[in-house]
Amino acid sequence: MPANTPIYGFTYPCPGDTVDAADFQLLATQIEAALVVVDQDYDLALNRFNVDSNGNTQNIAAGVATVITVPQYTIPADGVYLVSAIISPASSPATFNALRVRVQQAAVSRFGFTINTELNTGRTYATSGPVVATAGQVIRAEALFSGAATLDVFVNLSVREVCRIA
Amino acid sequence: MTSPDLDCPEPENYAAVALQMQETALQVEARLYEVERDLRASVNRQTHVVTTTAARTGLPTGGFNDISPIFVTNTITFSNYPGFGFSFGIQDPPGAGEYQIGVYVNAIASGAVTDNSHRIVRIRQFNVPPGSGGSQVTVDTAEATVFEANVGGGMDITVTGVFDMAVGDQIAFEMDHGNTGSTMNISIGAIYWITFLGSRETVEVF
């Protein structure tokens, strides 16, 4: 009656069992499968999911929280990711009181940063924080400005895996 | 014997092939387990994320208020190392090393808004030396300052920093503001987080 090792369940014959080539093949195949899993862990350890993307200039209307269409990032695997969104005003509306950038996970706002722009219209602002995400969820930025008419903005989005859920 | 030290049947023990296969299986398992454990420790760094589920209210002006998550109901959004607790205290393991720590709050005046008044959110690393009678010694800080835009919705503030932490060090999240018109509230959904980057003793390349 074959038995199995306690962690990976490798199958081995017990004394008295008839041993044939199939037993060797089964053990070899099981070890190979475990090695493939370790190889995957190795790849993930060395090659974390990371992305750093610049967007396009996007025009947003005053008083409307607007989704930034580019860049966006689809989470490739369950995990905790550190997301940073950097927003730069790219135009100078006549009235420009405030600018807020938030990070959305699956269309839900998670965190952000608001700046009083009454005296600092030309600066770049950033927010960063963690998202506990599942594969397929879209990470994107949302911008809101308070002022007159419209504002051109430019967003950089970086997403860095810090911990894998597996 | 063959490298790396895995036993193979020899002519004198062909009769014990079954036992030999058991030994081989256990030896392979032992080695694979060590490798997998180390790789998973590398991939799954100790990380702890706390999100508040109630508003923190009534923060006065005139100095830093402790806004650490222990003072309001919250949920642990993710943790593979609950030992960090609410004070993000450092234990061994993971031990002394570099930690990335952050906080997000939406700070909103409870009543009258004092336009252009400041809001400062600070992450403060401290320890309590033996014999100090409980006095805290600040080791390092990271902070962000914004000025109220008074456009509604409060002010979003995030602070992130990398801290060189020793075993026993703790973290306090603090906020000061100059909104003399009313006290300050912190909205539901504040986020506090910490993740281990690497130990002091070992240079780790990820």
Image (cartoon, coloured by chain):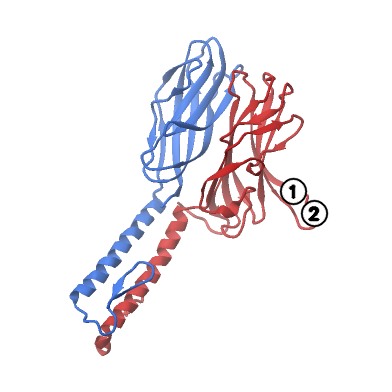
Chain colours: A blue, B red
The reply to whether discs 1 and 2 touch (Cβ–Cβ < 8 Å) is: yes
Q: Residue at x 44, y 33 (%)?
A: A157
From this view, report whether residue B174 is shown above or below residue B127.
above
Q: Chain of mark 1?
A: B
Image x and y of residue B156, in percent: 58, 29
Q: Which mark is residue A21?
A: none
The x, y position of residue B160, in whole percent, is 58, 39
Mark 1 highlights which residue? B137
Q: CA distance from mark 1 to mark 2?
A: 9 Å
The residue depicted at 39 percent of the width and 24 percent of the height is: A56
Where is A142 relative to A38, above or below?
Answer: above
Quarter placement of the N terminus of chain A: bottom left
Is residue A40 at all visible to an observer of this figure? yes
Q: Residue at x 62, y 19 (%)?
A: B150
Q: Earlier in the sequence, mark 1 or mark 2?
A: 2
Mark 2 neighbour class, 10 Å CA radius: few under 14, some 14 to 19, many 20 or more: few
Is residue A127 shown above or below A59? below
Amino acid type assigned to the residue bearing label 2 in the image: Ser
- Going by the image, does B115 lie left or right of B52? right
Residue A94, by quadrant, is: top right
* Residue A142 falls left or right of residue B95: left
Q: Is residue B4 visible?
A: no
Among the 4 quarters of the image, the one containing residue B183: top right
Residue A12 % position (x, y): 29, 75
User: Residue A29 placed where, x, y %?
Assistant: 25, 66
- Residue receiving disc 2: B132
- Numbered disc total: 2
How packed mark 1 is, by other alpha carbons closer than 10 Å (few <14, some 14-19, many 20 or more), is few
Q: What is the secondary structure assignment of the residue under circle 2?
A: loop
Q: Amino acid at mark 1?
A: Val
